[in-house]
Structure formats: C-alpha cells, structure tokens
Image (cartoon, rainbow, N blue to C red):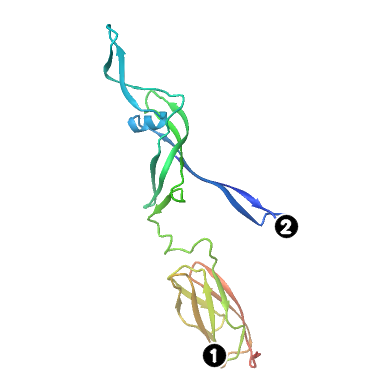
Amino acid sequence: MTITPEISSDPVKVWQAAVPVLYNVKEASFKVKATFLETNLATTELFYGAKWEKATEKDPSGVWKEIPGTWRLNLSSTPNLEEISLVVDWGQAGVQNRAVIERAMVADRGAIQLQRQESGKFELTIDALDASGRLGYVLTTDDLKDGSTPPSKVAAADLEADTVAPGAITYVSMSGFKPGTAITVTTGTDKITAATGQTDQRGDARIPLTVASDCPAGSYEIKAGDGTTEAAAGTLVIDVKPKTV
C-alpha cells in the first residue's frame, strides 16, 4: 500500500526577484494505492464499479430463470464509481497510526493478478474527495505534541543585557526547546551562576544569571541546553562601569 499526499502549485513572481516570492496551491490530493487480497462482494464491486446479480438463462420454453448458485456481474463500459469512506491503519514500535478519508472514490484500477498458490489481487487507486474543506485526517498515539519540539521551531537563547556590572542580575530568555524539560545554563565561570529552570508548555523559559560582586571584568560565553539541544545566548561582558542609556 502506498499513501501519496500531493499538491500542485503556481509560483508568484515579482519583477524585483529572479525566483518566486511564494507559491499558491492550485490542486491538492490524497491518494491511496492498494492491492486488495480478498475476492469478496465489497472488493469486486468496488473494483468493477458494478453490482452482482443473480445469473439467469432461458429454459427450453424461452422463459428466463435464475441459475442456482450462480451470480453475474456485468462489465459496464461506463462503470458506476461509488463513494466510500476509507480507513488505513499501520503501526511501528508500539505506536498506532490511522488515516481516515471521509469521502473517497476509485480514481484508477490496475491489473487483476491470479496465481495458482495465492489469493487474487486487485489493484486500486482511491482518491480523497473534498469533505467540508479537508481531504481527511490522521490519528496517532505517538507523543508528538507534548513530547517533542515541533520541526518548525529552532531552539534559541538570548541575553536580555549584554553588559552588566559585578553584583548585577540579568536574564537569559529561551524558546524552541522541548516543553517541560530542565534547562542548564553554562557561563564558563563560577562567578556567574544560573538558577535552575524549566521550559513551559511552549518550550520557552527565562532564567536569571547572578554575577558575583568579585567577578573579574571580561567577556563570558553564555549557553543554554536541555541535555540534547544547545543554543548560544551570546557574550556577556562584565564591566566595572557598564554603559548606561
């Protein structure tokens, strides 16, 4: 089985640039290409686009009668494609996933494979239809939302003040880290200490830095990390006479 979400788009160009400034979606599709391994009523009627009916024949007197135990499916030159709902389940390492297509129809059909020692195989491509502005939806038991940082967010740290005097307190602001994790701030000296902190549900944190009154003047590299991701906050300058604005 193959699941293929596709889009086609039109580039939006401007005369000031040689490349598009953005893309507008022109078409979108969600296709499921599958091989059905069971020959039954649902599979065959979906594949052929026709209904099974009792097979009949003329008796010697010219009257049409049903043939006992025999069914017939007419291969129409204009198959009747029915609307269906489709659910696809798969799993990996204990995580269960499900794709639900609320409205779908057969968009293409392939070969019927018949083997001596195997079940019959029916190749179908099923295409999602619009259902109130969506093609369908995906469900998962994986801890994606709360247990990891979204791919679109990059861990970052920033000093709220670049220059301070000995004895001062400043802060490091962080964003894009894994939500609900402990943050460690390194300063390169025991004269600048950071309080313990933890990211909130958005992956953000604000941790105070305390500069000892006997901290030597100089530049110190400040970094923040959660054990797996690290971000440079910048250089903190300790100046006996810090600049004022």
- Closest to the camera, between mark 2 and mark 1, is 2
Query: In this figure, which residue is indicated by the disc labeled 1?
Result: 212
Q: Residue furthest left?
A: 68
Vertically, is 157 above or below 141?
A: below
Q: In the picture provided, is 110 more to the left or to the right than 65? A: right
The image shows residue 166, relative to residue 231, as above or below, that is below
* Residue 190 x %, y %: 53, 85
Amino acid on which disc 1 is placed: Ala
Q: For the point 40% across and 57% down, which residue is it?
A: 142
Task: Provide residue 158's location: percent of width, then percent of height.
Answer: 57, 76
Q: Amino acid at mark 2?
A: Ala
Q: Secondary structure at mark 2?
A: loop
Q: Nearer the viewer, residue 223 or 37?
A: 37
In the image, taking residue 21 as reference, residue 100 lies left or right, namely left
Q: Which residue is mark 2?
A: 17
Alpha carbon separation for disc pair 2 and 1: 52 Å
Q: Quadrant of the C terminus?
A: bottom right
Q: Return the x and y of residue 20 as percentages of the image width and height.
A: 67, 54
In this view of the protein, which residue sits in the foreground, 78 or 19? 78
Is 51 positioned to the left or the right of 130 in the image? Answer: left
